[in-house]
Image (tube, rainbow, N blue to C red):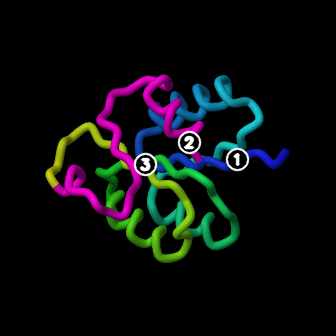
Amino acid sequence: MIAKHLMIVDDHEDILFFLEQGIRQTWPNYLVTTAKNAQDALQYLKRNTVDLMLIDYKMPGMNGLELAEYVRGIAPRTMIVMMSSVDPPELKSQPGPFDAYLGKPFGISAIRPLVTAF
């Protein structure tokens, strides 16, 4: 069985660590990759395929919405989940370049249906 590949993009290392560890413990056969910013994520996506991306909305440089729009253009089959601790209206207006929205903070149980859906 081919493992699913998840990518977490967030500029906060503690959130990256929490999500990466939680996903690895819950789904040990999944490949988990992290990026601290949109630019690193895009560099990775140029060489790799990702099944699901968890993207933070508010990041320095390119924000999560801009990253999601770019990812949609180069990897339209990748499921994109936008995460945010703020509640900007543009994140609630579907359709957008993302498939789901999660307000921070959240636990691993909140992403379970999303991870198992792809």
Q: Name the residue carrying label 1.
A: 4
Circles 3 and 1 in contact, beta carbons < 8 Å? no
Task: Give the camera-side residue of 99 and 88.
Answer: 99
Q: Residue at x 36, y 64 (%)?
A: 97
Residue 75: percent from left, percent from top: 56, 70
Task: Give the camera-side residue of 92 and 20.
Answer: 92
Q: Residue furthest right?
A: 1
Q: Residue at x 61, y 28 (%)?
A: 21
Single out the mark in the foreground, 1 or 2. Answer: 2
User: Bounds of the magenta span?
Assistant: 90-118
Residue 116: percent from left, percent from top: 59, 37
Q: Name the residue carrying label 2.
A: 117
Q: Label 2 sits on what residue type? A: Ala
Q: Which mark is residue 81?
A: 3
Q: Is residue 103 magenta?
A: yes
Q: Residues within 10 Å of mark 2 (few under 14, many from 20)?
A: few
Depicted 93 relative to depicted 44: above or below: above
Q: Is residue 107 magenta?
A: yes
Disc 3 and disc 2: Cα gap in Å? 12 Å
